[in-house]
Amino acid sequence: MWNLPMAKLNKREYRIEVVRPVWMPFNDVAQTIVESLVNKFNYPTTGPKAEKYAVMIASIIKAAQTLPKQSEGRKPKYLGVSFGSKNWSRFPLVGR
């Protein structure tokens, strides 16, 4: 999607919220937001992968909502997404 250089981060200087792909949109507003993002990124809207993409987007939004507000003196917190099929096999909504 984007080809941005990755910053070398010192793990003692930040916290991480790992995205767990287990959330679905819970109401009409959430469904509209997820559908909008699916369309924006040209992800499939039908077929076997459509629900997997919706689960990932909804889960990323949910993880972002849990991030605490940043305040002075606190470590920044980032969202993390695991890569590799072995990391997703325990999540039946998005795994193989």
Image (tube, rainbow, N blue to C red):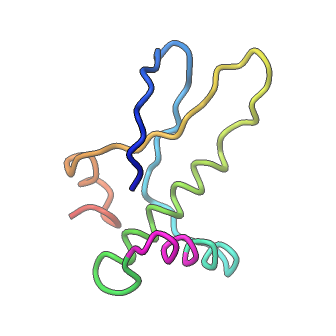
**Residue in front for this viewpoint, 28 or 37:** 37
Residue at the limit of the structure toward the right, as seen here:
72
Residue 79 versus residue 71 in the image, above or below:
below
**For the image shown, how many numbered marks are present on the structure?**
0
Q: What span is colored magenta in the figure? A: 35-43
Say which residue appears at 47% left-offset and 47% top-offset. Answer: 19
User: Where does the image place residue 1, in percent across and percent down from the top left?
Assistant: 39, 56
Residue at the limit of the structure toward the bottom, as seen here:
46
Q: Relative to 88, is 29 on the left or the right?
A: right
Residue 44 location, quadrant:
bottom left
Task: Examine the structure image and report whether residue 41 is included in the region drawn in magenta.
Answer: yes
Residue 76 versus residue 64 in the image, above or below:
above
Task: Examine the structure image and report whether residue 83 is included in the region drawn in magenta.
Answer: no
Say which residue appears at 54% left-offset and 70% top-offset. Answer: 37
Q: For the stretch drawn in magenta, what is the main secondary structure?
A: helix
Residue 61 location, quadrant:
bottom right
Residue 7 location, quadrant:
top left
**Residue in front for this viewpoint, 39 or 79:** 39
User: Where does the image place residue 84, in percent across and percent down from the top left?
Assistant: 23, 47
Residue 70 versus residue 44 in the image, above or below:
above
Say which residue appears at 45% left-offset and 66% top-offset. Answer: 55
User: Where does the image place residue 16, in percent across and percent down from the top left?
Assistant: 52, 31
Say which residue appears at 29% left-offset and 45% top-offset. Answer: 83
User: Where does the image place residue 36, in percent across and percent down from the top left?
Assistant: 58, 76
In the picture, the quarter occupied by the C terminus is: bottom left
